[in-house]
Image (cartoon, rainbow, N blue to C red):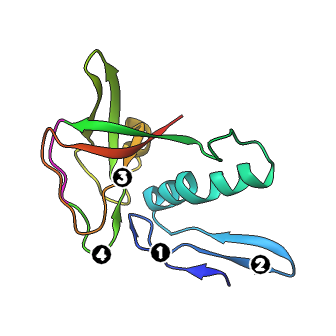
Amino acid sequence: LSFWRIKIRPGGPPLFGTWNGTPLFGLPGNPVSSHVVFISLVAPWLSHCMEAHSENGPSLADRVRVKLTEGIKGAPGKLCMRRIRIEAGEDGMTASVHTHQGSGNIHSMVAHNGLTLLPPDTDAEPGDIIDALWCR
């Protein structure tokens, strides 16, 4: 077992290890948590293994800076990866927060196109510029 549990929200209990030499990922039970872990950990690892990544490294998402249209409450002691809708405009990129952030909210997986990268113990106010993953 290489790791089990990481400090992200949602998606904290994934695991990674090998079984008889075969790599094994274990995803969380909630649909949204599994989606977040797949986008942020599994897909980049698979791209890296297939050497199908750009010079910037493997990813299904681009790291961007976005201006928030609403505030976000962070997660105590964990990287906060909330679902957001990113739009590019004349004034740069803006992000609106999906209204219901529950881990079982399947609609939020198709209604968003990004994830916040809000550091642990950090809240963000409307107008703040933060890092985010813009999912492709």
Circle 2 sits on which residue?
Answer: 18
Q: Are marks 4 and 3 in contact (CB under 8 Å)?
A: no
Q: Label 3: state its secondary structure.
A: loop
Q: Are marks 4 and 2 in contact (CB under 8 Å)?
A: no
Circle 1 sits on which residue?
Answer: 6
Q: Quadrant of residue 18?
A: bottom right
Circle 3 sits on which residue?
Answer: 105
Horizontal side of residue 122 vs 42, given as left or right: left
Of badges 3 and 1, the one in the foreground is: 1
Circle 4 sits on which residue?
Answer: 77
Mark 4: few/some/many CA within 10 Å (<14, 14-19, 20+): few
Q: Are marks 3 and 1 in contact (CB under 8 Å)?
A: no
Of badges 4 and 3, the one in the foreground is: 4
Question: At label 1, which amino acid type do we have?
Answer: Ile
Horizontal side of residue 74 vs 13, given as left or right: left
- Specify start and end residues of the magenta stretch as a single range: 69-73
User: Residue 111's mark?
Assistant: none
Question: Quadrant of the image for the N terminus?
Answer: bottom right
Q: Quadrant of residue 23?
A: bottom right
Outermost residue toward the bottom in this view: 1
Q: Label 2: state its secondary structure.
A: strand
Q: CA distance from mark 3 to mark 1?
A: 21 Å
Q: CA distance from mark 4 to mark 2?
A: 28 Å
Q: CA distance from mark 1 to mark 4?
A: 11 Å
